[in-house]
Image (spheres, rainbow, N blue to C red):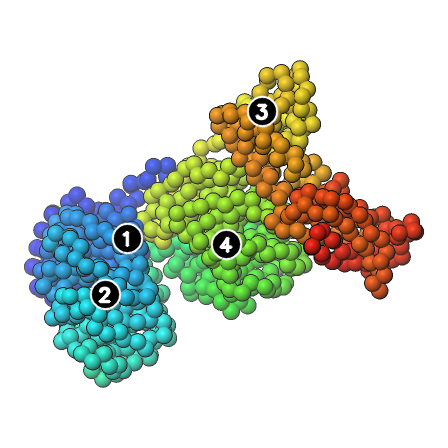
Amino acid sequence: MKNRCFSILMTLIITLAFVPNTFAQDALQGSLPEGAIARLGGGKGTIYQIQFSPNNTLFAVATSAGIWLYDAETYQEVTLLKGHTGAVRSVVFSPDGRTLASGSSDETIRLWDAGNGRYLRTLTGHTSVVRSVVFSPDGRTLASGSSDGTIRLWDAGNGRHLRTLTGHTDGVRSVVFSPDGDILAGGDVAGTIRLWDARTGRHIRTLTGHTDWVLSVVFSPDGQTLASGSQDKTVRLWDVRSGRHIRTLTEHTDSVESVSFSSDGRTLASGSWRKIYLWDARTGTHLRTLTGHRSWIASVVFSVDGGTLASGSVDGTIRLWNANTGQLYDTLTGYTNAVRSVSFSPDSRILASGNEDGTIRLWDAGNGTHLRTLSGHTDVIRSVVFSPDGRTLASGSWDDRIRLWDARTGRHLRTLSGHTGSVNSVSFSPDGRTIASASWQEIRLWDAGNGRHLRTLTGHTDWVNSVVFSPDGRTLASGSSDETIRLWDAGNGRHLRTLTGHTDSVRSVSFSSSGDAIASGSWDETILFWDVHTGQRLLTLTDIADIHSVAFSPDGKTLASVGQPPTRLWDVISGTHYETLSGHANAVTDVAFSPDGRILATGSFDGTVLLWALAPTPVESKQIAADVNGDGIVNIVDLTLVASNFGKTGQNAADVNGDGIVNIVDLTLVAGAFGTTAGAPSMWHLHQETAPTRDQVQQWLRDARQMNLTDSTFQRGILILEQLLASLTPKETALLPNYPNPFNPETWIPYQLASSADVSISIYAADGRLVRTLDLGHQSVGVYESRSRAAYWDGLNALGEPVASGVYFYTLTAGDFTATRKMLIRK
């Protein structure tokens, strides 16, 4: 290292040059985005990469909050460079130390004056996260590798794009120039390393052998050896000239995230889960292991003089080591890890956040004060949730465990063990007696009082990412990476139905407050709404990025969705995106409404939680008028009451617009006000006794469209009628379970028709003998589930005689369609 006096002088000079950005960490807390009322845990961000300056006076840390610069001798913060709108994933100094380049999740590269921190320019062209940036040895060229599978070369002086190297079959995670600048190496998600002629862009050769993602590549100082670290838990050494595999270092027990050569080329460092391994670079001999980090080590790098090794971890620390002895010089703290889950207490006073460092933090939701930290898990917290009475907090972790805590004191109560994979989601039943937990291909139910395992629900074929109870506690919904949602009977664990329609992993499911609808968010960039009772898809919302989490507001009127920033708020009935909340510097992982509906909390990979104030929804006079029966909610009942009063004149509650006559305008205004008065919207589940027929709704739509009215509520009413028609139009013909079953002496047999057909139902005894045929005649497309529309059997045979107790079968014939189900008569 340079002598200490020189270092202190340099620190003073640099600090003065960076005055506008000094104390930037405080600015993180002070500068709130519009609409936000508090930022919780606003530390220095998640660490991704560390790099030393060529003269060893500084080191830069790429984080989700920006780029932190430190004095390399005193380890004091110098400044924070901000400007990227996403996490900074990579940072590098130019060979002369004058320029700093950074690559970000916002798909851009930024160049900075390393002397004063001044922003110089932005390089654009990549279409995904920029994972790696590196200068050529002569400083004239900048190379960038991206998750879009390309490497781009740029003129480092003016930012002009020179060429794009294609050939990687998947995302590029790391790029590096050889010391002579002739070769460029790129490691990718396909497990390959490609070598390129850096001057012409010609592909030289591909190195294969890794069986998983290549996360880091680095040349030895003499340029003869290339080292690669992989998710397959190995480090491989390669002969650069021939491409020959020299040896494999296999001491690691988990993914190798970063590799680095010392300046003399004698030592190789590799970082993985909690450990840094030092190797003799010539023989591959394991020299020593450095321990102390409590989580993944994202970056290891030697100082230019080779005396110091810096390591940055997602446990929120940077450690500085003597590279020769392994002695720990110092630990820099304050880097906040990703927030993976947020949850409010039932009284809305406390917010819990589950973090990537394995801790849970409790906050005062009113003033943002940190109350306490709960420690005990050994890996990432994926889910936190309060019990309905607010006394217990449950947490699920990558360590395969569920922990229960006293929410008031933070005391650990018990640990639930049994899952053999990450616990991705936990949920309390509304009565607080049962806990559901989701993991690899299974959901487990536990007694919340004593921790006893009750049962295991199986059927999903991939990770189960989200599990939640319905408001009445009778149904459990689960979303999985197998692209499906499954509904279960929460009482006995019986599988009820599977909802299909997503084309990628389902990350989150949420029940509406009425329990009639489910929203599901997926990495296919869509949100789907489903009718819980029929399994029909009601509405599709198209987002612009992968969805990580969705949540209904307590009043059921709003849905919040999060993924890549920003957060979006949607009108549940119309499906309209009406507000955007921007402020996180990285992807948003989870979202939760406070039970009182006043605050929205969002947790992010940037290591912070933002609290947003929610304005109450105004209730307009025409919305109140649309509540025809005065029960505090506008729903299908009000719609039916208007329809039944069509043509009537004079004073009438069904005359919503007060023009003296009940007509299609009133009906459409009611539809447009669905769910907007006190209470939650219940249009999703059609109560069959009062539901209109498909033909009726078709006629209503025809009449409404002919009115050509531009009123926003009227236009929304047309949209609701279209959704109502869709819910009355089955995608396939089906025979449904009869009710009641068992029965005595009568039963109803429901069905649905995707196309008009002549319909009959034949009833058979257990021995196959025909008992009775119900000829229902020609039926239109629609749902025939209510007692007024379903087929009715009075329990009599063809001779009018009561049939005996026992098992019977009923067969639906509708055109070319036939289906059979079983029923039971018990007398």
According to the picture, the residue beneath numbered tag 1 turns out to be 107
Q: Is mark 3 in CB contact (under 8 Å) with mark 4?
A: no
Task: Return the x and y of residue 465 as percentages of the image width and height.
Answer: 49, 58
* In the foreground, 54 or 313: 54
Task: Return the x and y of residue 160 as percentages of the image width and height.
Answer: 15, 53
The 10 Å Cα crowd at callout 2, few under 14, some 14 to 19, many 20 or more, is many
In the rendered image, the quadrant that contains the N terminus is bottom left
Secondary structure category for the residue under label 3: helix
Distance, label 2 to label 1, CA atoms, is: 16 Å
Q: Residue at x 58, y 35 (%)?
A: 721
Distance, label 1 to label 4, CA atoms, is: 27 Å
Residue 339 falls left or right of residue 594: left
Numbered tag placed on residue 825 in the rendering: none
Q: Compared with residue 783, is residue 697 higher up or lower down, i.e. above or below?
A: above
According to the picture, the residue beneath numbered tag 2 turns out to be 175
Task: Return the x and y of residue 807 as percentages of the image width and height.
Answer: 82, 60
Q: Compared with residue 392, is residue 400 higher up or lower down, i.e. above or below?
A: below
Of the two numbered discs 3 and 1 on the same chain, state the one appearing first in sequence.
1
According to the picture, the residue beneath numbered tag 4 turns out to be 502
Task: Return the x and y of residue 592 as percentages of the image width and height.
Answer: 47, 46
For discs 3 and 2, the disc positioned in front in the rendered view? 3
The 10 Å Cα crowd at callout 4, few under 14, some 14 to 19, many 20 or more, is many
Q: Residue at x 28, y 45 (%)?
A: 28
The amino acid pointed to by label 1 is Glu
Secondary structure category for the residue under label 1: loop
The amino acid pointed to by label 4 is His
Of the two numbered discs 1 and 4 on the same chain, state the one appearing first in sequence.
1
Distance, label 3 to label 2, CA atoms, is: 64 Å
According to the picture, the residue beneath numbered tag 3 turns out to be 665
